[in-house]
Amino acid sequence: MNDASERFLCIASYEKGQDFLRQTAEMGVKPTLLTVDALREAAWPREALEEVVTMPAGLTAEQILNTVSWLARGRRFDRVIALDEFDLETAALIREHMRIRGMGVTASAYYRDKLAMRIGAQEAGFLVPEFCRVLNYDELRAYMAAVPAPWLLKPRSEASALGIRKIQEPEQLWRALDELGDRQSRFLLEQFVPGDIYHVDSIVAEGKVVFSVVHQYGRPPMQVMHEGGVFTTRTVDRASRDWAELTALNGRLAPALGMARGVTHGEYIKAHADGRFYFLEIAARVGGAFIADLVETATGVNLWREWARLEVMSLRGEGYVLPPTFESYAGSVLCLAQTAEPDTAAFDAAEIVYRMKKHHHAGMIVKSDDPERVKALLEEYSGEFARRFLASMPPPDKPTA
C-alpha cells in the first residue's frame, strides 16, 4: 500500500530542537531523527519520533548520503531539516542528492561560511569590517599594508567565537598560517572593530522577515569565550534608535542572502569609532546559550515551534501566520560554575522567571516591562555570579552544545 504520510528527516549533531520535533509531530508530520551514536540515549522526545537513527561521528559525506539513501528506501522524506548549525552542509548535500526542496549547497554557504556571508552582505550594501580571504599571499600582504592591525583570524565554518585568534602584526599571521598548513584556506582575516555586539533573532517566511527581536550582549561573546567571565544578553529598548536601525537592517539581510524560509540568528557590531552598525555573521538556526528561552520570555514566540510550523505549512502550501505576541523585556545571565549543581536560591528578585538547569552552569532569565530594570539586574547579577560561581577553563577546540 502507498504510504502518503508526510515526513521530515531532522539532523542533529548536538542535543537540541526537542520543541521542533514535538511541534512537527503535533501537526501530523512524522519526524525521523538522524543523530550521532553518542546521543542515542539523550533526552529526545521519543513519543514524537517515528525513529531515532544514529551513526558514528566523523562519517564522510558519501557515507552519510548512503545512510540516508538506505533510509529512504522504506519511507519518503518531504523535507530535510538541520537542527544544528554544524549539520547545515550535510542537510544541503542530502537535499541536492535526493532533489528535495530547500537550501542547496551554494545557498546554505551564506549562512555557514563566514567568507561567503561577508561577501554577500557587502555586495548587498551592508557595512562589513574590512576582510580578506586567506588564500593568496600577495592579497594578504596588500590587505595588512592597507588595513591597520589588530586583525582577527577566523575559521570560516565554526560557530560562536571558536577558533578565533587575535593578530597584532604580520609576522604573527605568517606563523599562524604555517601552523595551520593546508587548513589555512578555511580561515579569513578581518579587521578587529571595537564596539558593542547585538544579536537579532528572526523568522523568515517566503523571503520576508515576519518576526524579529533585538538583544544586546554584555561582554562580547569572543571575550567571554577566550578570557572567561559571565555571559549576559538583554532585550534592547524598543523605543530606541538601536532597535529601529537593527530591525531595518536585519529585515533586508536574510532576503538579500537568499533565504526563503526558516529562522536566523544574526550578529552586528556598533563600532565605538563611528557609531555605525557593521554586519558580523548570520546563521540559519535558533540561537544557543538559552537565547530561544530569552526570546520566548520577551515576546511569547517559541522559535523552535514556529520554525516547525513554518516548515509544515510550507509543505502543505499554506501561508504562515505569526501567532499572537507581546512586548516585554528579558535578560539572561549565564556562566560556567565551579560546582556541578550551583545553588542560585539566594537570588530572589521578583523578575526572575527561569533558572537554568545545566551541569556545571549557573544561569537565569529575568523579565520586566522596564528595560532599565532588566539592565540593572544583569549588571548586579553578573558581578555576583562572578564572585559566587564562576569557573574558568581554556576555550574548547570544538563546540560542546
Image (cartoon, rainbow, N blue to C red):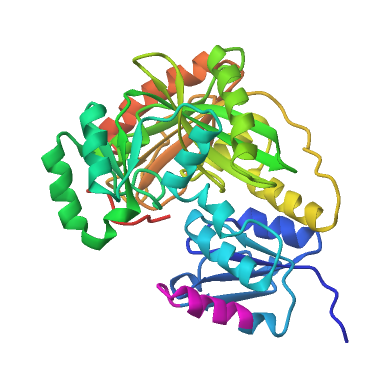
Up the image or down, 98 lies above or below 156; here it is: below
Residue 117 place in picture, x, y as percent: 48, 43
Q: In this view, does 52 lie to the left or right of 164?
A: right
Q: Which of 50 and 297 is in front in this view?
A: 50
Given the current orientation, which residue lies at the most extreme bottom position?
A: 1
Magenta part, dominant SS: helix
Quadrant hosting residue 297? top right
Up the image or down, 302 lies above or below 348; here it is: below
**Quadrant that contains the C terminus:** bottom left
Residue 200 among magenta residues: no
- Number of dots carrying numbers: 0
Given the current orientation, which residue lies at the most extreme right position?
A: 1
Q: Is residue 280 left or right of residue 52?
A: left
Write the start and end of the magenta stretch as one range: 56-69
Up the image or down, 343 lies above or below 62; here it is: above
**Quadrant that contains the N terminus:** bottom right
Q: Which residue is drawn at 36% across and 44% down?
A: 342
Residue 82 place in picture, x, y as percent: 58, 59
Residue 289 place in picture, x, y as percent: 46, 43
Q: Which residue is drawn at 86% across and 50% down?
A: 318
Residue 335 place in picture, x, y as percent: 35, 40
Residue 60 among magenta residues: yes
Q: Residue at x 59, y 56 (%)?
A: 17
Q: Can residue 184 be seen in this view?
A: yes
Q: Which residue is drawn at 62% across and 84% down?
A: 70
Q: Is residue 43 visible?
A: no
